[in-house]
Amino acid sequence: MTAQTSDIILDRMMSLHPKIIDLTLDRMWRILAALDDPQSKIAPVIHIAGTNGKGSTLAMLRAGLEASGASVCAYTSPHLARFHERIRLPGGLINEEALQEVLAACEAANGGTEITYFEITTAAAFLAFSRAQADWTLLEVGLGGRLDATNVITPEISVITPVSIDHQAFLGETLEEIAFEKAGILKPGIPAFIARQDGAVLDVIERQADTVGAPRIVAGRDWDVYEQHGRLVFQDNEGLLDLPLPRLIGAHQVENAGTVLATLRHLRLSDEMCEAAMPQAIWPARMQRLRSGPLVDAAGPAAEVWLDGGHNPAAGSALAEALGRLTPRPLHAICGMVRSKDAEGFLTPLAPRLESLHAVAIGGTTQMTPAMEIAETASALGIDATTTDDMDATVERIVRKTPTARILICGALYLAGDILKTHE
């Protein structure tokens, strides 16, 4: 008899997925009621929505809270290498035994009824958190906000990170439509910390905040953050902080740090605890320099290998800016994407920096964009592009020609997850 593992249970849960995803909270309320409403028994929640920067913001919030001595549960998605990454309990990621227990309980409570994978696994996270002793729960929205499976809680604080175009099939074609969905996490009387936004996006968020009666604290109005002389400067009506830059690279991470600092100041954390959030936070596959693994070995000692899971136009712009902060080197990309993403929008800001692009097909999903299609898109942008099905050999070819190359693996979290199974 096959041993029960979390992977086996998760595979069964995938088979329950409706053939057509209709965004609704009905299935979520049903399974939570069957589980005796674990979402009402978790530690106070900071609920984080947005298009880009949710994970990085959560990582810095966690670092600051933990530096203050608080114990923290955290829920993020998707995972990169293994599902356990999605559910963090005080002391570390959920272990296999505890994960099996909550997944089995959710499977039994659901009784074979149709439910999305994200809904039933979010219920499992709530169940795990209800059994933990924690001071705070950090919840990252999966898709949108208004009808996301996490939006069944009343948080202590809401956070909306930068909103841009993504997931149009579910959230709407325009920035305003997408912003409305993100603003759906706002609750009456619950303070909302709003990152710097496009003007039209901020208008939508402010209108929704007015409608529900949510006080908001807004970047550029209630606080400001910027880089100066290699330091991070944050200022609000309580004064100025002069801090080290975030460990996470890029101007977008400075903006994310501002949202984090505004939130931590609201919680009355000391300047020292705010400072601790900067150098201690890490977030895999966000401008991550790989230090070991087969591709690093293939690159040799003089080259660099970097990994980034960003996949939409805003992420492409942030990635291009972050790369521009590094000491100049010839840049070569290995890129894989999923079909629902805008390859042209992602690659356009990167094109002026790239010496070459090598397109790959991503394993583990039927929704991959064919490598040839990515290469054709890149070529139309003036990038020297080709396809490959052997990443090790591609890296070796790049460094034979350019020993000091900077090699960027990018375009999809699926691809990043595959890489992180064998690299650090």
Image (tube, rainbow, N blue to C red):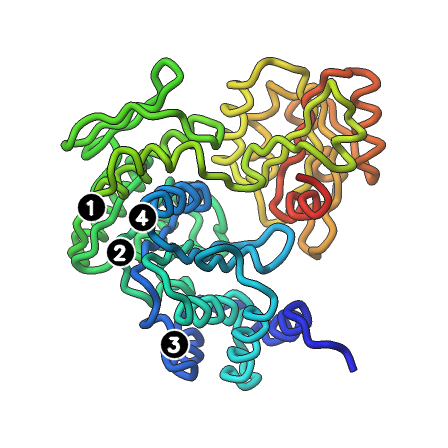
Q: Quadrant of the N terminus?
A: bottom right
Q: Residues within 10 Å of mark 3 (few under 14, many from 20)?
A: some
Q: CA distance from mark 4 to mark 3?
A: 23 Å
Local secondary structure at mark 1: strand
Tell me if mark 4 has few (under 14), some (14-19) or many (20+) residues whose alpha carbon lies within 10 angstroms of its own: many
- The amino acid type of the residue labelled 3 equals Trp
Counting residues from the N terminus, which is met first, the one under dot 2 or under dot 1?
2
Residue ID at (36%, 43%): 67
**Left or right of 355: which side holds 413?**
left
- The answer to whether any part of residue 214 appears in the image is yes
Residue 186 is labelled as: 2
Residue type (three-letter) at the residue carrying disc 1 = Arg
**Total labels drawn:** 4
Percent x, y for residue 247? 47, 31
Which label is found at residue 29? 3
Residue 20 visible at all: no
Residue highlighted by disc 4: 159
- Residue linked to disc 1: 216
Earlier-in-chain disc, 4 versus 1: 4
Question: Mark 4 and 1 residues: CB-CB less than 8 Å, in contact?
Answer: no
Amino acid type assigned to the residue bearing label 2 in the image: Leu
